[in-house]
Amino acid sequence: MPDLDNPFVLLFTGLGGTLLFASLVGLVLRHAVAKGQPNAVIDNLVARVNAWWWMVGLLGLVFWLGRDAVIGFFALLSFLALREFLTITDTRRGDHQALLASFFLCLPVHYALIWVDWYSLWSILVPVYGFLLLPILAALSGDPKRFLTRAATIQWGVMVAVYCLSHLPALLDLRIPGHEGDGMLLIAFLILVVQGSDVLQYVWGKLLGRHKLSPTLSPSKTWEGLIGGLLSATALGAAMSWITPFTPLQAAGLAFASCVMGFFGGLVLSAIKRDRGIKDWGHLIEGHGGMLDRLDSLCFSAPIFFHLVRYFWT
């Protein structure tokens, strides 16, 4: 029997039930609507649900292994996301030292500081010291061609893929009176509402979408999908307040702010993809694209959520 007093057990039991229902819906649609024939929308839905089984299972395992595993897991995600980001950029031989420092200095040192809970240093390591160090290393190569673009690209990649994303595991060390040790539940809350918003925007857009939001940057996004997804995810946040230190109203407000930033994260990263002439950041996750295709919204929402909680609840 599952321990129904454990919020993690209840949460992941609910997620498992939701995914089981989604899998059954996909099976019914594939046989009743598509008649077993290829259908782009239904096949994409099934692929997304199958990928979510793997992602939820992996996240549950990492949570079960504890704090060190969570930090290491997000460090790995940052490495993969940074690799995707810098792979599509136009770097030159003169950037090699800056690239090495990004992957093997900034990233591990930053996560090590989170691991030892040194907030006053990790919060400025990348945006101050990394910001200064990376162009210095590039300048020492003596290659001035497109220097500003190259330096800014590497800086931006480290900020998004390492610094911004790392605010998720940093939630582990927030000391909220009466809720010490609940950092993993905060991580779960943020991931579920932001990723839920992405899914709900997709669903509402398919059901009611008529007015394109930004045809040149993200042709699939609609105003109807955005509004429906944000409102639904806000309601989801309120309903999940029981795993957090927040009242339903507070949880709804945090969910709304996080999902708005998540939307802008997706839009900004879509603009970069369009600039580089690609559809997805990669092909790592079936039905989802690359790692950054799944993390773009979290990269923008995590710092906002972290600092709102840190300022108002600790």
Image (cartoon, grey):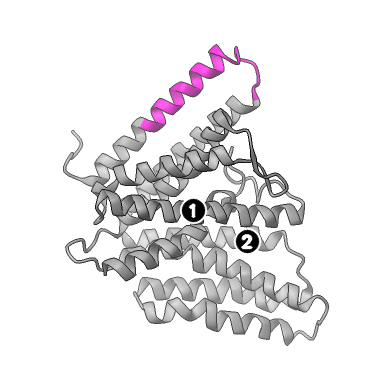
Mark positioned earlier in the residue sequence (2 or 1): 2
Callout 1: SS: helix
Picture coordinates of residue 144 (x, y %)? 81, 82
Within 10 Å of disc 1 (Cα), the crowding (few <14, some 14-19, many 20+) is: some
Q: Residue at x 37, y 71 (%)?
A: 115
Are discs 2 and 1 less than 8 Å apart at CB?
Answer: no
Amino acid at dot 1: Val
Verify whether residue 34 appears in magenta.
yes
Q: Quadrant of residue 138?
A: bottom right
Range shown magenta: 18-39
Q: Along the line of sight, which residue is nearer the eye, 41 or 142?
A: 41
| Residue lying at the far right of the rendered structure | 145
In the rendered image, the vertical position of residue 14 relative to residue 284, given as above or below:
above
Amino acid at dot 2: Arg
Left or right? Give the position of 191 relative to 159: left
Q: Quadrant of the N terminus?
A: top left
Callout 2: SS: helix
Q: Which mark is residue 260?
A: 1
Q: Which residue is drawn at 59% across and 80% down?
A: 131
Verify whether residue 243 appears in magenta.
no
Within 10 Å of disc 2 (Cα), the crowding (few <14, some 14-19, many 20+) is: some
User: Residue under circle 2?
Assistant: 83
Main SS, magenta residues: helix
Q: Along the line of sight, which residue is nearer the eye, 81 or 204?
A: 204
